[in-house]
Amino acid sequence: MHVCQSDEEFKAVLTRLKWMTCPHCKRAGYLIRHGYLRGFDDRHPRKKTVRAQRVYCSNRSRADGCGRTFNIWWADKVGRLFLTAQSLWAFLKKAVDTGNKRQAFRDLDCDLSDSAPYRIWRRFLKARSAIRTALIGLAKPPPCASDQPGAQTLAHLQAAMPDHLSPIAAFQAKLHAFFL
């Protein structure tokens, strides 16, 4: 998976497609654009937005590619989630600070159901150990006054990505992996 943090980086990756190797078959010279991956997000709840560029490893007409596809994502989009990375960060931060997941989600002014914050929180708790494992290679865990595992994970994420508006987007762009 490849994740781009800016439009310039995204355009640069697309211009280098012919020289890139396929992540599946490891062959170069066969990658072509293959449409977009579209979905909803919290900024445009009624209109589908582009979430990723699909790329195809061509096996048509004497090409030796594998015929599989993969996606090049924007860092501010989180896979299989309606929220953007910035909104997810705001929700998790507020939920940890206040202890009230439902109110933290309502503050986002999002059109999802009342059970959505609890599903998102469960996904965060399930992914916590993988997140911390990835972060340990980037920065030491900071001292945290809270004994809550969620608060410790967010503090570690913020320490590893200190200069970013959304540490989740920075995490995805740096590690080329989804946060949740």
Image (spheres, rainbow, N blue to C red):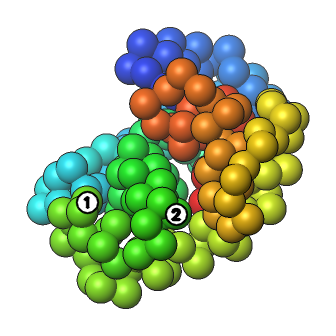
Q: Position of residue 150 (x, y in %)?
A: 65, 63
Between 42 and 49, the one lying in front of the other is 42
| Cβ atoms under marks 2 and 1 closer than 8 Å | no
- At horizontal 39% and vertical 51% (from top left) the residue drawn is 90
Q: Secondary structure at mark 1?
A: loop
* Figure quadrant of the C terminus: bottom right
Q: Is residue 21 visible?
A: yes
- At horizontal 54% and vertical 21% (from top left) the residue drawn is 163
Vertical arrangement, residue 128 with respect to residue 54, above or below = below
Between 168 and 5, the one lying in front of the other is 168
- Residue on which the image places disc 1: 108
Vertical arrangement, residue 179 with respect to residue 11, above or below = below
Residue 66 shown left or right of residue 166 in the figure = right
- Residue on which the image places disc 2: 96
Q: Position of residue 127 (x, y in %)?
A: 70, 65
Q: Label 1 is placed on what type of residue?
A: Leu
Q: Earlier in the sequence, mark 2 or mark 1?
A: 2
